[in-house]
Each structure stands twice: as C-alpha cells, then as structure tokens.
Image: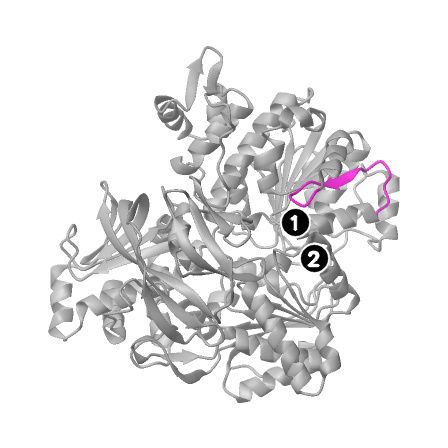
C-alpha cells in the first residue's frame, strides 16, 4: 500500500487521520491523482457582447477549450454530448448557445434528474442578471401560480423527467408557445438514465421530439428540431449512449481541458467484529459507523467534508452519530456544523442546507446521492463514500465534489459488508485502471414501450411515420395494443380509446397498478410503489421509511392495492426473502466455454416472498426471522445462465465438493459483482442455482433481470461474462473469512436462509468454469 505522507495530498489533517486508520490495518489502498493544468479558449464570435460581459462579471474570464467545442457543435445545429470530469465546467458549454438562443427569441428546455440540480442551475442563470432571460423551474414543488407564470412567460424552462412525462407532454397544447420556439433541449447528468428508468427516459425523449415537431415553426432543412445537448461527467461510449437515449446521432466531446487540483483517494475496509450473523458468519463494523467516526474527526480538524451514504436513514444516522461523537469529545460547539441532506426535505430546508454548506456554516454533511450531481459547492476538502455507490460513474461524481475550487482534496471509499465492496477495496485497478461502466438501457422492451405508445397516442394520434421514431419494436407493440382495444386504428392513425390519460404510474419503475402507502391513524397518503416491490418492502411487518419517518406496515392488501402503516421505530430494519423458480421460455443464444456453456434468453421467473429478517439498525446483527404469507407472482424476463458438463460435475464430486452449496455461493457472489459490469444495483437482479436443474439437466446458475421484459443487465452480463465471473472468483478469494460471510457469498435476500453455501467449492467450481 502506498504511503499517505505525500505532499500532494493537500490536506494534512485528513492525511493524518487516514494514516491513523492505516496503522489500524483498515486502509487497503491509497491512490495519488496528480494535478492538471487547464487550456483556455476565446469566447465564440457569435455570442452577444452582453452575455460575455455578464460571464466575465461572474468570474469566468475565458472558457476552456472543451466548453467552446460543445457550444460550437450546438450553435451549428449538431446534437452533442459532453463527457468530461467533475467540476470541469460542463454547464458553461451548454449555457453559451442556450442563452444566446433565448436572447434571440428562442426557448430552452433543461431536464435534470433531481430538483436540487435544477434549482442550482436556476440560481446560476438568474445570477447573471439577464433581464430578457425569463428562467423558471417547474417541478412537483412549484406552486400553481408560478407554474401558470412559467407557461405564459418563461423562455428558459427547468424541469425533470417526471414532470415532463406527467404534465408538460400531456398538456402540450397549453405550452404551445414554448414548444413552437424550442431550439435546445439540455439533458444534464444523463448517466443517471440507465436500466428501467433510462429506458423510460428514452421513450419520454422520443415523445418530446414528436410534440416539438408538431408545434415547431419552420426551420432550415439541415437543422435538428430541437438540438439536443447531453452532459455527464462519467458515461462510457458517450456517442453510442446519446444515440440510444435520444434516437439521434450526436457529436462527442470527451477531452477535459479544465485545471484540476491533486486528489488523494483511499480505500478502507472496516474490521471484523465479534458479532455473528447467519450460520455464525462474522460481521464487519458497518460502513455507517466507520463513516460517522471519520466525519466527526474531520470536522474536529477543520476539514470541510461530505459523507455520501446509500439511504435516507443512513444520512440521518451518520449525522446524529457524528454530532454525538463531537459532543463526547468536548467539541460540542462543532456539533452544530454537522447536518444531513436527503430527498424528502421541504424545498426551503434543502436550499438552507445548501447555502450553509457554501458559506461554511455547515462543515460536515451526511448526504444521499442528492448532492452527487453537478451542484456548484466550492471549498470542500474531503469526501467520504460510505459503501460502493453502485457505479464507477457515481464514485467519481461523488469524489469530485471535493476540491472544486482547484485545491487539493481527499476522498475515502469505505467498504460495506458486500461482495462487490470487498472485491473493489482489494482490487483498486478495477476502479483506477478501468473506464466507467457502459450505461445499459433497453428502450425496445415492450413492457416499457407499450405504455409510452399509449401516452403518445393520448397526446396526439399516432401515425405510421411516428412508429419509426419509437424504434423497430413499435409496429408489433402497437398491433398488440390495438388487439387489446387500448388503441383504435382510423384513417389518420391510432387513437387512445380511454377518457382518462393512461400513462404509467411512474417512469422510475416497471409500471402497472401501484400500491398506495397509507397512514392508518390519519388516512394520509404517504406515497405509491409498484406492486412487485410491495411484496418485499411493504409486506406486513416491514419497516417502511418515508421522508425520514419510520413506519411499521400493519397490513398489505393486494386486492385493494393498499398497504396500511403506523408510525413507529422498532430499532431494526427488515429484509424480505423470496423463493424463486425459473423456466427457460424460448430458444436461447448459446456460447461454448470449453466443456461448459454460456446462455442468454427469455425465462419465466416465479417468485414468492416467504419471510423477512429483522436486523439491528446500528450493527446489522440478525435479531430474528418471521414468516410472510403472500401469493407467488410470475414475470417474463431475460437471464444469463451457465452450465458445466457432466464430466466437469463428476470431477468436482470426486473432490468431495458440495455441488449445491458451491453453485449457490457462486450465484450469490456473481449477483453481487454484476453491478460493476452492468451498471445496475444488486436489487435490480436475481438468481437461481441448482446442482441439477430440471430443464438443463446440468449444474446451472441463472442470473436474471428483476423487471418485466428485462432491463438489459443480463445481456450485458452475457457479453462480459469472462471478466464478470473472473471478478466473482477474485471477490470470494479476497475475503478473509473462512467459510463465507456477507462480504463474499452470503446474500441479504436469500430465500433459503443462505443454506447451503460452500465457499471453497465455489472457488473450485469457478476455476473449472473459467478454465
């Protein structure tokens, strides 16, 4: 491991604190990323002098070369995607052509994946003091009067995918003046659009193109109407991704010409504790406990720090623990400088925390990924990432929050008790020597495409030419919708047949009828979740979190699509377990692997939630298991699976390997590692393994997409199987436990209670498979 006593670390206090942890054996790697000089360019010649003057007054004396490259592409009518580092000033690249367009009478639509990012962009635009630029944010927090003003007057509209899907597109006639003059659509932080959410977003973008074309005033034949500008600090193959997301070709700008200060990046693995989990497996100190301890130490040392966590509850828990540690250390006056930030806060509360962080009134903030995006917060010295955030893209986004003023910075990744985290902290080359993951989306998934075609028909009747816009699967899907009498064919196209607007309950899920979460004491509607998710997070006895409040589910009524909850915090969390059966539904694609075979194709998965674990919130210790009585449910999805030959199976058996336990352990670890290659979360996928599967007749391990129709993750696994399964083996071997633990082969959602599992057998099985 590299030393921490490097002058390039730039933050002596943080380096000293990390050195203490290194001596305790918790640091597994330290990477020093050097500083970089910037390359400036001239302002584009077509920019109004007023706009140049306002940018210079705001402290931007000259743009960087990559910012001008983006602006020139967009100004010339070419779609463009910029993928450069965090804090490289990507927003200026699209602001130059966008504001120039608005000053010339056009309109701009800005789409952000979060309200916080849109609010930050609104603050920047208004801060320029351009009287002819009437910027407005329209989201779920916008009062009716402000929304009406925006519809009548705004020429720079900031919104999010949900509002675009549920409000702007269905009511496009009321926004006709805005759409008629629309010249640019900006899709910021576009790497967030992946998996099911990304597939929905791709179809929303196609509907937006259709509505814009309907209202657009005449434009030159060579010009795209409107021009799309996509922005992300971290996206793999940006040109290809832009094409899949928008259906349009786009220029890619990837060379980062901005300056950057040095970054010291450390990996930390919390120690094993004396606590024991299932089957007596050891439990590590939680990432949350490690993060709260480091956060309090950094605040006490005057280091301005963000701590990123995976859940709203963890944000509150870590902030509370850090404040308590400061008070116990005799630094109670500093406890007021520690706060939490997450979704669910009132808009004015979110803005207050953001401002306190900018001014230094808050120097230690525990946050969910709500602050991962490109919000302009300078002066931070350090970032703590409590648990792998899901993708390399997110990791670099979060680490990039520190050092945004050009100074030196420190970032620390703290591993959770999870196979992927274990692998990464012992294989840093998988982070520092690798490109970010390919962003996986599947817009042609019929289960996603169908409701968007219905929504499009409700907005404007569908025509034959429209179907080309929605992709090659659209004609067959439209025919199926017509058979179900959801669409009706007439001479001018397909029409929506219902009075109510169909749509989908949410573009962030698989659709269908949602389950309402209702407070039984007050009758207050807390929210809605999709029906499949209700089986695992809103079953009777589940602990349900909503906007920082903790509730216990008293009843799940699937017939009436309602889950009743009551306020209360029992001090534990719950994790549902499911039993799963899988059948191959069609002829798969097959790739020989020596004597073994790799397959990809459609499968029918039958799942049934059977029980849930209660775990102590602070330590993860298992307190008990309770039964659930819910019906099974079946989905048609896609899976990757591999089989070994009878001869390979016989060889393993001759060594005394527990074949069922080996396959089961390999399945768990493979699910845990797939997010590194497919850009998914382990909860987006599932698996089944068998010593002798009924259909294949061989030892078989399946990993499937957990969404109807598939989400593209299993197909990505099929394409990267060699690297994925090699990393799976390395993750198991890296773990210091003897017989298996949550850091390698145990799964928190295993319906069989993590039995049987055989760590040594899994290594031998993967050795034979990988040859």
| Colouring | one colour
Numbered mark located on residue 115 in the image: 1
Determine the residue located farthest toward the top in the rendered image.
491
Judging by the rendered image, the residue that carries numbered circle 2 is: 350
Q: Which residues are magenta?
A: 128-142
x then y, percent, for residue 340: 65, 66
Identify which residue, 13 or 534, lies in the foreground.
Answer: 534
Check the image and report above or below for 405 versus 484. below
Identify which residue, 601 or 594, lies in the foreground.
Answer: 601
x then y, percent, for residue 522: 55, 52
**Picture quarter with the C terminus:** bottom left
Residue at image coords 14%, 75%: 655
x then y, percent, for residue 581: 24, 53
Q: Secondary structure at mark 1?
A: helix
Taken as a whole, is the magenta stretch helix, strand or loop?
Answer: loop
How many discs appear? 2
Query: In this image, 176 relative to 25: left or right?
Result: right
Residue at image coords 43%, 37%: 448
Q: Is residue 534 magenta?
A: no
């Amino acid at each position: 491991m590299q030393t921490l006593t490097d002058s390039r670390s730039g933050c002596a206090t943080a380096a000293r604190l990390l050195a203490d942890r290194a001596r305790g054996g918790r640091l597994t790697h330290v990477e020093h990323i050097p500083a970089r000089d910037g390359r400036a360019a001239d302002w584009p010649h077509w920019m109004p002098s007023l706009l140049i003057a306002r940018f210079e007054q705001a402290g931007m004396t000259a743009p960087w070369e990559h910012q001008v490259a983006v602006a020139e592409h967009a100004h010339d009518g070419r779609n463009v995607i910029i993928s450069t580092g965090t804090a490289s000033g990507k927003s200026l690249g699209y602001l130059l052509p966008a504001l120039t367009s608005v000053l010339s009478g056009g309109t701009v639509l800005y789409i952000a994946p979060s309200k916080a990012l849109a609010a930050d962009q609104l603050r920047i635009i208004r801060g320029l003091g351009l009287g002819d630029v009437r910027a407005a944010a329209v989201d779920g927090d916008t009062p009716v009067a402000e929304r009406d003003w925006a519809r009548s007057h705004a020429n720079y509209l900031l919104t999010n995918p949900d509002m675009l899907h549920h409000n702007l597109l269905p009511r496009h006639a009321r926004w006709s003046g805005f759409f008629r003059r629309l010249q640019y659509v900006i899709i910021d932080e576009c790497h967030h659009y992946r998996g099911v959410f990304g597939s929905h977003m791709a179809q929303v973008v196609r509907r937006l193109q259709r509505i814009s074309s309907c209202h657009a005033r005449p434009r030159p034949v060579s010009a795209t109407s409107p021009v799309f500008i996509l922005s992300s600090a971290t996206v793999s193959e940006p040109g290809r991704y832009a094409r899949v997301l928008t259906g349009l070709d786009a220029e890619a700008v990837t060379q980062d010409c901005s300056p950057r200060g040095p970054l010291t990046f450390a990996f930390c693995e919390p120690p094993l504790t004396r606590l024991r989990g299932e089957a007596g497996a050891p439990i590590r100190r939680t990432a949350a406990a490690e993060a709260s301890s480091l956060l309090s130490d950094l605040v006490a040392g005057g280091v301005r720090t963000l701590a990123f966590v995976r859940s709203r509850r963890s944000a509150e828990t870590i902030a509370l623990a850090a404040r308590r540690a400061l008070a116990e250390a005799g630094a109670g006056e500093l406890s007021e400088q520690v706060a939490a930030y997450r979704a669910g806060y009132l808009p004015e509360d979110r803005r207050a925390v953001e401002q306190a962080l900018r001014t230094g009134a808050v120097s230690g903030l525990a946050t969910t990924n709500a602050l991962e995006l490109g919000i302009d917060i300078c002066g931070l010295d350090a970032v703590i990432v409590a648990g792998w955030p899901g993708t390399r893209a997110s990791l670099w986004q979060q680490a990039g929050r520190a050092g945004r003023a050009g100074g030196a910075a420190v970032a620390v990744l703290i591993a959770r008790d999870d196979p992927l985290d274990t692998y990464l902290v012992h294989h840093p080359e998988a982070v520092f020597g690798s490109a970010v993951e390919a962003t996986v989306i599947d817009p042609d998934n019929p289960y996603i495409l169908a409701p968007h075609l219905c929504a499009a028909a409700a907005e404007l009747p569908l025509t034959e030419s429209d179907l080309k816009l929605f992709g090659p699967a659209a004609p067959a899907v439209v025919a199926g919708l017509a058979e179900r009498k959801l669409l009706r064919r007439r001479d001018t196209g397909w029409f929506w047949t219902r009075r109510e607007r169909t749509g989908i309950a949410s573009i962030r899920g698989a659709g269908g009828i949602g389950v309402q979460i209702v407070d039984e004491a007050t009758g207050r509607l807390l929210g809605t979740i999709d029906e499949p998710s209700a089986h695992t997070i809103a079953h009777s006895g589940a602990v349900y979190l909503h906007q920082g409040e903790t509730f216990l589910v008293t009843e799940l009524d699937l017939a009436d699509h309602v889950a009743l909850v009551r306020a209360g915090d029992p001090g534990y969390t719950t994790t549902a377990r499911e039993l799963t059966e899988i059948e191959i539904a069609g002829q798969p694609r097959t790739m020989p692997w020596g004597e073994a075979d790799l397959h990809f194709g459609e499968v029918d998965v039958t799942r049934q939630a059977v029980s849930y674990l209660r775990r102590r919130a602070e330590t993860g210790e298992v307190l008990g298991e309770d039964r659930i009585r819910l019906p099974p449910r079946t989905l048609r999805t896609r899976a990757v699976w591999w089989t070994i030959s009878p001869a390979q199976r016989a060889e393993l058996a001759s060594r005394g390997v527990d074949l069922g336990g080996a396959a089961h352990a390999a399945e768990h670890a493979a699910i845990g590692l797939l997010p590194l290659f497919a850009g998914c979360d382990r909860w987006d996928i599932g698996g089944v393994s068998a010593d002798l599967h009924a259909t294949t007749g061989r030892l078989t391990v399946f990993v499937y997409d957990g969404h109807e129709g598939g989400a593209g993750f299993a197909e990505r696994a099929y394409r990267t199987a060699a690297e994925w399964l090699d990393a799976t083996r390395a993750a198991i071997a890296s773990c210091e436990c003897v017989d298996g633990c949550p850091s390698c082969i145990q799964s928190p959602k295993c319906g069989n209670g993590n039995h049987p599992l055989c760590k040594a057998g899994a290594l031998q099985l993967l050795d034979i498979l990988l040859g």
